[in-house]
Amino acid sequence: MGYLSTASLCGAIRGDFLNMTAMICGSRLGRSLVRPGGVLFDLEPQRSAELQKRLAKGLDEVTQAAKLLWESSSVLSRFERTGSLSLDQAHDIGLVGLAARACGLLQDVRHDFPSGIYQLFHIPVSTAEAGDVYSRAFVRWLEIQRSVAFIQELLESLPAGEVAASDSIMLAPNKFVAALIEGWRGEICHVAITDAAGKFTRYKVVDPSFHNWFGLALCLRGQAISDFPLCNKSFNLSYCGFDL
């Protein structure tokens, strides 16, 4: 919405968090970090401690930026009751992720289908009820805080040993597999089909934007044209994610 006080701070903060990723794998965008079966880079105690310090500092800065946002009456007047979706609407159109939780849907793949580390560590599912721009922004703020707390908890209890990754993974032949993960926009579905030799014959990714674009269209019904940019960014969807 062009609220420069918070936007200018967040621009700098974004760079700080990208640099944390670069500290782990050498790339601000996380290139080469994730591999089938695990990751390629380890975190020794010294880097883990440094990352915890940077996370704490980053959260403090985000908190200051958010405080400016929530204390602005002009921001709140634009956020509240703008671009609203009801719980029933969210359920009926299959909304996922943050946009769904902002309508009151208790929905998170890590909560609904816990696997791996999420069987041991549980992140509270952040929800709101109004389904408007304010609710989507507030749920995002809750998730920032809980994500940082979750990462810090994991960093304090990292196990020793080699990284979990494999150079060669043999795929089972003639199989159909579907997997769900929770991305920052919401549920991401991966579907794979193998042939008789265990080679991929089809691989499909369904981005959360595929489900949520209609939610954006629905929340704009009856709104002013000037509300479109605000509602659009509150969903923060991907054009190419819809076309996958």
Image (spheres, rainbow, N blue to C red):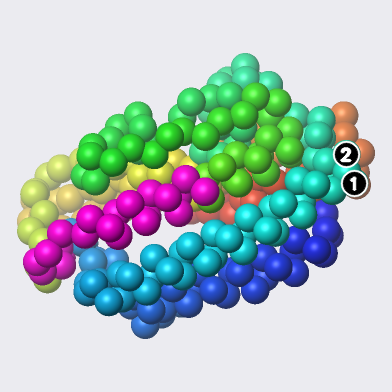
Q: Amino acid at mark 2?
A: Ser
Farthest residue to the bottom: give it.
26
**Label disc, if present, on residue 136 of the rendered structure:** none
Residue that appears at 23% across and 37% down: 119
Q: CA distance from mark 2 to mark 1?
A: 5 Å
Residue that appears at 83% across and 41% down: 76
Examine the image and state in which quarter residue 197 appears.
Answer: bottom left
193 relative to 77 in the view: left or right: left
Q: Are marks 2 and 1 in contact (CB under 8 Å)?
A: yes
Secondary structure, mark 2, is helix
Is residue 1 shown above or below 119? below
* Residue 152 percent coordinates (x, y): 37, 56
* Residue 56 falls within the magenta-colored stretch: no
Let me know if residue 215 appears in the view: yes
Residue where numbered disc 1 is placed: 74
* Residue 137 percent coordinates (x, y): 67, 44
Viewer-closest of 16 and 34: 16
Is residue 75 shown above or below 93? below
* Residue 154 falls within the magenta-colored stretch: yes
Residue that appears at 15% across and 59% down: 159
Secondary structure, mark 1, is helix
149 relative to 113 in the view: left or right: right
* Residue 84 percent coordinates (x, y): 75, 29
Residue where numbered disc 2 is placed: 77
Which residues, given as a range, are shown in magenta? 145-166
